[in-house]
Image (cartoon, helix red, strand yellow):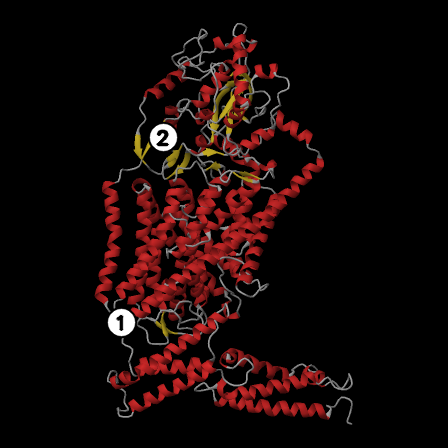
Amino acid sequence: MANVAKKVSWSGRDRDEEDEPPAAGEATPLLNGASPGAAGGPPHSRPITHSPFLRLGKLSSVDLNDDVRELETEATNQFPSEIPHNEKLLLLKYESLDYDNCENQLFLEEERRINHTAFRTVEIKRWVICAMIGILTGLVACFIDIVVEKLAGLKFRVVKDNIDKFTEKGGLSFSLLLWAILNSSVVMVGSVIVAFIEPVAAGSGIPQIKCYLNGVKIPHVVRLKTLMIKVCGVILSVVGGLAVGKEGPMIHSGAVIAAGISQGRSTSLKRDFKIFEYFRRDTEKRDFVSAGAAAGVSAAFGAPVGGVLFSLEEGASFWNQFLTWRIFFASMISTFTLNSILSFYHGNPWDLSSPGLINFGRFDSEKLGYTFQEIPIFIVMGVVGGILGAIFNALNYWLTMFRIRYIHRPCLQVIEAMLVAAVTAAVGFVMIYCSSDCQPLQGDSVAYPLQLFCADGEYNSMATAFFNTPEKSVVSLFHNPPGSYNPMTLGMFTLMYFFLACWTYGLTVSAGVFIPSLLIGAAWGRLFGISLAYLTSGAIWADPGKYALMGAAAQLGGIVRMTLSLTVIMMEATGNVTYGFPIMLALMTAKIVGDYFVEGLYDMHIQLQSVPFLHWEAPVTSHSLTAREVMSAPVTCLRRIEKVGTVVDILSDTSSNHNGFPVVESSPDPTQVAGLRGLILRSQLIVLLKHKVFVERANLTLVQRRLKLKDFRDAYPRFPPIQSIHVSQDERECMMDLTEFMNPSPYTVPQEASLPRVFKLFRALGLRHLVVVDNHNEVVGLVTRKDLARYRLGKEGLEELSLAQT
Amino acid sequence: MGLPGELQPECRELLVGFASSSVRLTGCLVRSARPVRLCQSCYRHFQSVTEQLKNITRAVGNSSESNCAKSLLMSDRVQLVVILSQFFNSTWEKANCANCLKNNSEGLSNSTIEFLNLFNTTLMCFEHNFQGQAINLGPSNHTEVCRNCSRTYSNLNALYNKMQKMTEQGSEHRTPLCIDVEDAMNITRRLWSRTFNCSVPCSDTVPVIAVSSFILFLPVIFYLSSFLHSKQKKRILILPKRIQSNASLVNIQEKYS
């Protein structure tokens, strides 16, 4: 109510002032961009110099030469062309995060107000948050693990009883149908929630987190809703028997948890706990998200150091030692939480024997050591892994392209997922049916022994691979004694699982690719080991489990192409440091060989999603490109003291959805040079408009509360759209003073700076806008993420991506 | 009294006691190694060995230096008594004999007795029906055994499965049944399906192939139809606002082609 009252009085006052406009307003007539066609403009419209060349909202302060204007008009005359989706695009919907701290006057004031001890409590709060991230991530991992175990156990028991029943009587086709229908109905639920409620929860989430840490804002990626869907989706897709793992999604889950906790509120639940308000900005949130991702890795593999290195490898451009130490803390807490809860759950408290979701088991007996002669063999395995990984990625590339182009409707996506689930079951069943590899049942080595056509007291060996959750299959491939699988079984399994996993990745279900890759690798690795022992007629290298491990490492490396973090993760998961060296060799060769053909799976998906991702460095052959060629121009600038109407028009212009506006000196004389004074963001302007921080109001109501940094933080991260902000006609005539709120010292580069130079500055500082100025400190252009991400080293030299809209 | 370092007579007695009981146990273990009858035949001996060992540990002796436990269990590097008792214990645990004994280890548990009785009947049945047949085992012609003993065999199987389930319920981890029961079951199963070739599952290859190929064809139809009927996703190209955008493109092409 108060708002309305204010508004009324305000507009009344505005009328009074019409006759004597404030001094700054006098500049307005001289500006040629002041909304000539603004429908229903104020009745007392002032003389406006019409400029046919400049579009709405473009101000004359951008002093441009004539040829630029002509180019510009040409561009606007062209019709937007439609093309099918391809990999050489950058989507407009992806925006940058504001990793650069805005040091405006409000910020300085706040810093002055907070004394030294308060900063110390902030530091303590950071540690508390990290601990909470660790604990919650561990708990979520426990939840996933236990529920998957229960549900999958139930499913396998039902199917097994059914198969046992029908093996005696005949009619196994019904068991097949039962299995396929069970699978696809579970997967249907999992896919429906992803496709219809939160599509960003699809896949492993690692590409999305990678983008986030790179500085790209993927919509909805760190919301509570996404976490819920992710967790349920993972459970359902693993229970649904797809060729997927639950480890990759843990990384995303950890990141969402971190982003949620560090903000001390949930916008989805509309609850604000009024804590941790200091951390409500992108810079702080990013640090916590990297801690969350590390905690996720650590919970997934029981690899705290691997988790830290994963965050380092993926988000390393913004890093410092204190952060590393904090992240390590979060990782350790996470794996410890998981470990203690799971050991309680398994009935032997404080045994602490399950540090991660996947447990590779112990590799410490003496026969599992390796010798010098074996090292070349491991390298050969790395080569095989690289080639197979490249084939996997290439196949998945075509499939993903097809999916983006043709299977983009949610219901089609759900049907596809269901079909894949049914086919996975059918393939598994047929493989088990045709296999005649029977092994004697010993104690408790097999979780769900399927007898089928084997003699009583024996089980079907193929069934241990297909009729099980993928994690368990990996472990049994590593550890079952030599002779538990015959080579034929392994070969068929590898072949089938390879295609199934390749087909499954990229479906609209939340699921990871780590475990399927490990499984494929373990299967062919074991095969490799067996044939090696066969070729050398037994003797020294008898144990195939070791080769299964190396194969798994090589295959995973060939698909995802991570190096440092993956080596450490594998090393920690096996709990054997001596294996570090061969694992490293296998991964290295796999990466080198794989990179020769295609890039890694995650990078490929990032590229296919048309995300403006900034790699480590600018393309090597781009030194001849200068900032002038790279930048976007002309720039929509604002004056230091700007008319509200102009601001509103610029913000609501849908054709140029800009987010940052250079602020220039508001000189009354247009011919005079208008130097750059600062940079203001859309979000800040929206908060200013919402609170109606206008010059006239400040003069008249002295008691008015001053805007603080807190007001900006409260609106973060979901700033309301401009359409939701009501600005009355009279208010449009007011002026806004941006001096206090803009970032007074934005980073700038001269026009002659080369692309790699600009790139380095941009990437290292995590910038969002980089202003290009000429010798007179006049704004010439603006470099944003999309301007830099466009240039890429393709097959034949430097190529340029085009911008596109959905 | 002998020298101070010599063993006290009561300690020697204890040692001799342990020796004789462990001899009995060892003999029993080895004798009942094949076919495995460990638990049923040796549990008394095992109990007596544990008893003896307990006596040794409990014999705190009258003075501190003449401590039997100390001199028998910890005064040398080899510690033979400890090694032996550890061996017995680990064997017992490995065989999981506790599973088929009563809680206080006084005799076999009811279910085990029931199982062994049924096992004996099954074997008798096998023997009985097998009498008439030729010694050289042909692959197929044991239909008589299969027909006559199938009831007892399936009863035995069912009982075994029930026992297995019961032990699973008891603890979180899957613990195997005791070795006697397990081995008895294995022998019977091997006889049944390998020697007599009785379990002939009906394989219905045709329907399985039909159903699975139906399922495998579904995706093909799906992808074809979505390729033909679904509208291709189009992206609208946005022209970037840039100075000399054409010139720079030419620039690139000049340089790299």
Q: Nearer the viewer, residue A126 or A520?
A: A126
Q: Nearer the viewer, residue A452 or B27?
A: A452
Front disc: 2 or 1: 1
- Residue beneath label 1, please? A169
Q: Does residue B146 appear left or right of residue A91 in this picture?
A: left
**Residue A628 in the image: above or below residue A136:** above
- What kind of residue is marked 2? Gln
> Can you name the residue that lies furthest to the top here?
A19
- Residue found 30% across the figure and 48% down from its top: A415
Label 1: few (<14), some (14–19) or many (≥20) C-alpha neighbours in 10 Å: few
The alpha-carbon separation of the residues under discs 2 and 1 comes to: 72 Å
Q: Position of residue B94 (x, y in %)?
A: 51, 78
Count every numbered label the image shows and give the total: 2
Label 2: few (<14), some (14–19) or many (≥20) C-alpha neighbours in 10 Å: few
Q: Is residue A100 visible?
A: no
Chain letter belonging to callout 2: B
- Residue beneath label 2, please? B253
**Residue A793 in the image: above or below residue B139:** above
Q: Position of residue A761 (x, y in %)?
A: 53, 32
Q: Position of residue A804 (x, y in %)?
A: 37, 31
